Image (cartoon, grey):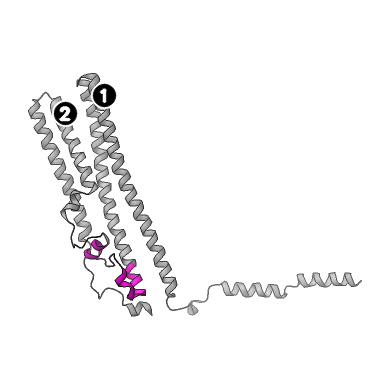
Amino acid sequence: MNAFASAIDLQQHWCDPARPSDSRRQNRRAEMADPPAGEQPTGSAPVAVRAQILSTEHWSLLATRNLAWSESFSRASWFVTVVSATVVALALVADSTDFGAGFRLFALLLIPLLVVIGVATVVRLVQLNSEDVELVIGMNRLRRGYLDLAPELERYFVTGHGEDVAGIMRTYGASRTRIPATQYLSSIPLLVSVIVAVLIGALAGLIGDSFAVRIEAAVVIGITAGLAALATLVLVVVRHVNRTWDRRVPRSSATMPDDHAVAE
């Protein structure tokens, strides 16, 4: 009888809706529920939390920048590979046809395709460079956030923390306030533009030769078309780069958040 009574008491204990375990669950749900609108917590997050958020965003921008650079190198190398393979194919066709009508037809089919791929590559490379500048600006802004949290660490920063041209160039490792001409000459978009201009010149000369013009005239046509194409592509690249950098105006210290205000 005692065992039977104990079993009944245990069953009543677990079936009782007012048992302590249910009360604890209700209290836990109440604690996890959102507070009323008038009781929302005020004030900023702790310094450690803010630093962690800034660091997470910094790594995100860094990963995105690495992807942009990988795409830039991949597109340029892929275009050069396609051009090299096409030149080899044209050489084999020229050897088998003795530069006859079959070679001209084959070249007139392939070279325009290379020109289209090259122009698209140049456009995308210029866009990637602009995206890289914007990512650098974002990383500089995050460094400004780090310095707002710990201003005494500014002397340890090698890269820039401003959003003006000087701050961006400092992050790129230059002390200038403008892009040097050597950077234009050594940039990947300009080097690809030279290859595209050579292809356009070769295509123009081949078209002139197909109309039975003299070889001297065909060479002049090809050189003229190539130089015109190179000038056009360089102008497009320089204009796009200048437009990207012209959007960056120096920000005065008055527009930057106050260190004490952020700390509070």
Instruction: Report the residue that reaches farthest toward the right.
Output: 1
Amino acid type, residue under disc 1 in the picture: Leu
Q: Left or right: 24 with respect to 146?
A: right
Residue 59 numbered tag = none
Image position, residue 190 (x, y; %): 20, 46
Between the residue at mark 2 and the residue at mark 1, the CA separation in whole angstroms equals 17 Å
Seen in the picture, residue 261 relative to 234 is either above or below; the reply is below
Image position, residue 87 (x, y; %): 25, 30
Image position, residue 126 (x, y; %): 25, 50
Mark 1, Cα crowd under 10 Å, few <14 / some 14-19 / many 20+, is: few
Q: Left or right: 20 with respect to 124?
A: right
Q: Which residue is mark 2?
A: 206
Amino acid type, residue under disc 2 in the picture: Leu
Q: Secondary structure at mark 2?
A: helix
- Viewer-closest of 95 and 235: 95
Magenta-drawn segment:
143-170
Q: Which residue is mark 1?
A: 92
Q: Is residue 169 magenta?
A: yes
Residue at 57% across / 72% down in the picture? 32
- Viewer-closest of 184 and 30: 184
Image position, residue 119 (x, y; %): 24, 42
Q: Secondary structure at mark 1?
A: helix
Q: Quadrant of residue 251?
A: bottom left
Residue at 22% across / 49% down in the picture? 187
* Magenta span dominant secondary structure: helix
Q: Quadrant of residue 200?
A: top left
Q: Left or right: 224 with respect to 126?
A: left
Seen in the picture, residue 60 relative to 78 is either above or below; the reply is below
Q: Is residue 151 magenta?
A: yes
Residue at 35% across / 70% down in the picture? 146
Q: Earlier in the sequence, mark 2 or mark 1?
A: 1
